[in-house]
Image (spheres, rainbow, N blue to C red):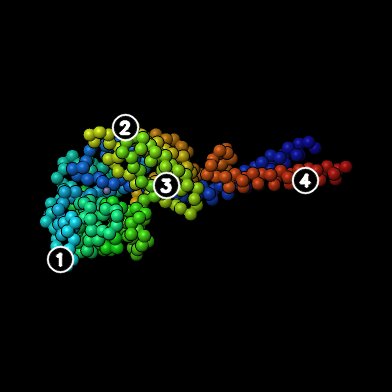
Amino acid sequence: MIKRPIFLAVLLVLAVLFSTASVNAQTVGVKKYVIFRDDDVAPWWFHGDTLQAVNQVHIDENVPVTLAIVPDPHAIGPDSQVFPYGQLTSNVTATRGTSPDNELLQDPAFLAYMRSISSDPLFEFAQHGYSHKDDQLSLLSEPSEFAGASATVQHEAIQKGRDDITEAFGITPTTFVPPFDHGDANTLEAVQALGFTDYCSGRGDPATLQGQADGIRVEPATVNIVGANYTALNTSFQLAKNTTDQFFSDPSNDTLIVAYHWWTFSGPGGSVDAREVQLLRDYIDYIKANEGVQFTRLDRQVTTSTGAAAGTALSLPQITISTAAIYGAVSSLMNVSGALTPYRLWLTRGVGITYLLGFAWFVVRGRDRRK
Ligand SMILES: [Zn+2]
């Protein structure tokens, strides 16, 4: 007679495990997308060792990154030629600029390196303005290459830059990142007309504030990694981790966009600062510690998930809905310190306590009957 309660107890423990397994499978299935955006990839500005070291982190970690390329940083037109600095006059006729050259072809080290990674699916080639000059046309307090310029001028500048990227790398960009994170309605209209499908800038961009436009995804960066030295950069990454924690605990938000500039990881003289690069690697590992992370590019064409890479520095188990549900349940029960799953723990405990109370009631009632 004593064996029957033990048998029932085992059954009950299994029942608890399976009942939480179904709950857990649903929550694990929620996908959280993380996107990295690296601005100011440009000829002449290029310090090969720093850009390569930063990109190597993405290769080692199997995490994609959208490279925002400035096509012609030395260009004197069409936009800045039509409207020279501070000399905005009304009734100026927009004319095509006098920069037929493609600067992407003129910096041999830059060209060779960019071509060497152009077929790697981890790297999206996006367009970051045309000359990246502040034309100072905008009424905004923030600088902008495009805001305030006519629709025709903006269209021509963006088209010239896009064609230069296509000529140099054989890739036609579909993501546009306005320099200084600022454009206007004409910028949005121009990139739409030119076939771009994603416009990514900052939260204060008037174009972004207009919300989703037809046929183009308009989205601001969530996090900006900045820092003139190691201490400042470290602080910036700490703030980014706080934002990341909020993102993973917010079920209404499914995409985190992290923007940085590759040159932020340079030391004096422009050479790579390995300690600063390590901060980026640590941050990516920090993100990977969360369940259900999907790393993708702004164009969403390539997605990798935690643990999916061969030879990654991190060897976290890949927990997806395809993993056996019972494994998910066990890991969630063991993950008692997991700050992101408190409601799941409450549910697990609630179900367990209910079963135990039911079991106690069953045993007591059984004994009463036998008396
Ligand atoms: Zn920039």
**Residue for badge 1:** 93
Mark 1 and mark 3 in contact? Answer it, CB < 8 Å. Answer: no
Which label lies toward us, 4 or 1? 1
Which label lies toward us, 1 or 3? 1
**Residue for badge 3:** 294
Counting residues from the N terminus, which is met first, the one under dot 3 or under dot 4?
3
Q: Residue 274 carries which label?
A: 2
Residue type beneath disc 1 = Thr
Q: In which quarter of the image is the N terminus?
A: top right
Marks 1 and 3, how far apart at CA: 47 Å
Residue type beneath disc 2 = Ala
Which label lies toward us, 2 or 4? 2
The kind of secondary structure element at disc 1 is loop
Mark 2 and mark 4 in contact? Answer it, CB < 8 Å. Answer: no
Horizontal arrangement in the rendering, residue 41 relative to residue 16 (left or right): left
> Which is more toward the observer, 230 or 327?
230
Mark 3 and mark 4 in contact? Answer it, CB < 8 Å. Answer: no
Residue lying at 85% horizontally and 45% vertically, measured from the top left: 369
Residue 250 percent across, percent down from the top left:
49, 50
Q: Residue 361 carries which label?
A: 4
Marks 2 and 4, how far apart at CA: 63 Å
The kind of secondary structure element at disc 4 is helix
Q: Is residue 239 visible?
A: yes
Q: Which mark is residue 112?
A: none
Q: Quadrant of the C terminus?
A: top right
Q: Can residue 60 be seen in this view?
A: no
